[in-house]
Image (spheres, rainbow, N blue to C red):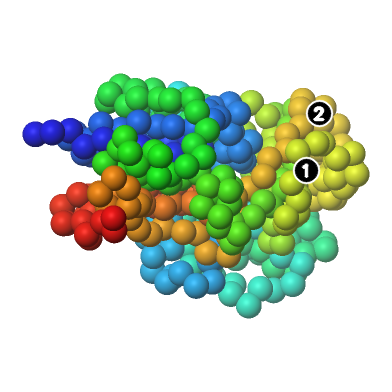
């Protein structure tokens, strides 16, 4: 049987997950991962990696639940395996706190994490500016370990890697039988998709090994995530801000807000700082179309626009991208326009 040549564009957590998913599931496919940047230089490498979904307004909730459920189950299996240390995946417990009681006190993902409950009045006394809180155990996936680990899995099943910026999908389609677009923010230029936009995030890396539980403000602007190497403290959510330079005022604001939530951080040393641009979209894009080139209709599957949910939904959306690819290869493609 002739091997099907598949190109996956983008090597962040979504692109790598999708490439691994296809390469391991479809042995008749020859998968090439093409990206200008690979770990440790992707936006995903700076992600705190806590599995915590946000709701996309126009996507059926059952789809979002399934994406999270599949990602959670997949990463939990890794956390429970001898691969956990190499992959940087483990369980993490903590609190999400709110200054006002949210309209949706029990979110759509509550039954998918472990031990979800409302915080007691005694627990909330630690956070006098907040009126309501949720306690639960989820997973943390440290991409500085996880992405190289995924890359090795991809190579082990015959995956091919090309360091190159893709600027024209029609040219790419001349050499491949199918394309999976996981280019994130790059889709703005690659597809002229102005619905995808940057959300600038700045974080601090602190030395605070005494912290074991995460704390996240429900507004998403302040979070404290203990990790293996350091504690990630953030952050900023600055939409349409393309700056990649560190901002001293942002740093001061992050420290001030985090110390207010966790006073012991006042004694923590700063190990480093990071700035990245999340590829946000009102609704992530996961769908198929075709590129007409050379008399052929080449399937093009889009999987991008996850915003801050890249790690959280990566495996679930990769499975759906795999399904769309497999469906495309089994179906007769539409007649290409000449």
Figure check: 97 above or below 80: below
As rendered, which of 206 and 324 lies closer to the eye? 324
Residue found farthest to the front: 338
The residue identified by callout 1 is 243
Residue 301 in sight? yes
- Mark 2 falls on what kind of element? strand
Question: Which quarter of the image is occupied by the N terminus?
Answer: top left
- Asked if residue 93 lies left or right of residue 20, the reply is right
Identify the mark nearer the N-term, 1 or 2.
1
Disc number for residue 159: none
- Expressed as whole percent of the image width and height from the top left, the position of residue 275 reads 73, 38
**Vertical arrangement, residue 108 with respect to residue 48, above or below:** below
Q: State the residue at coordinates (29%, 49%).
A: 298
| Quadrant of the image occupied by residue 196 | bottom right
Which residue occupies 61% across, 38% down?
43
Q: Nearer the viewer, residue 169 or 286?
A: 169
The residue under label 2 is: 270
For the residue pair 67 and 120, the one nearer the viewer reads as 67
Horizontal and vertical percent for residue 135? 59, 57
> Which residue is depicted at the point 27% across and 25% down?
157
Alpha carbons under labels 1 and 2: distance apart: 22 Å
Residue 317: where, in percent of width, then height? 39, 52
């Amino acid at each position: 049987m002739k091997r099907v040549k598949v190109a996956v564009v983008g090597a962040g957590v979504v692109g790598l997950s999708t490439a691994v998913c296809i390469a391991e599931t479809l042995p008749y496919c020859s998968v090439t991962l093409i990206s200008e940047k690979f770990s440790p230089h992707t936006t995903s490498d700076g992600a705190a990696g806590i599995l915590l979904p946000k709701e996309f307004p126009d996507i059926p909730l059952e789809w979002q639940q399934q994406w999270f459920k599949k990602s959670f189950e997949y990463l939990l299996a890794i956390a429970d395996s001898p691969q956990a240390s190499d992959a940087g995946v483990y369980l993490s417990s903590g609190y999400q706190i709110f200054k006002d009681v949210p309209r949706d006190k029990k979110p759509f993902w509550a039954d998918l994490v472990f031990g979800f409950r409302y915080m007691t009045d005694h627990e909330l006394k630690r956070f006098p500016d907040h009126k309501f809180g949720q306690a639960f155990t989820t997973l943390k996936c440290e991409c500085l370990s996880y992405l190289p680990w995924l890359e090795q899995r991809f190579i082990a099943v015959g995956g091919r890697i090309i360091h190159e910026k893709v600027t024209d999908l029609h040219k790419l389609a001349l050499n491949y039988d199918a394309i999976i677009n996981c280019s994130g923010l790059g889709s703005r230029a690659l597809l002229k998709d102005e619905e995808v936009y940057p959300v600038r995030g700045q974080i601090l890396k602190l030395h605070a090994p005494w912290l074991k539980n995460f704390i996240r403000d429900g507004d998403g602007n302040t979070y404290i995530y203990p990790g293996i190497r350091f504690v990630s403290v953030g952050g900023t959510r600055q939409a349409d801000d393309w700056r990649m330079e560190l901002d001293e005022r942002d740093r001061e604001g992050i420290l001030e807000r985090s110390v207010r939530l966790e006073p012991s951080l006042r004694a923590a040393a700063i190990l480093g700082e990071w700035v990245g641009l999340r590829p946000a979209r009102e609704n992530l894009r996961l769908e198929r179309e075709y590129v007409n080139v050379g008399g052929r209709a080449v399937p093009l599957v889009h999987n991008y626009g996850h915003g801050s949910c890249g790690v959280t939904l990566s495996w679930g959306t990769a499975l759906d991208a795999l399904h769309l690819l497999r469906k495309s290869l089994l179906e007769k493609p539409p007649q290409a326009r000449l």
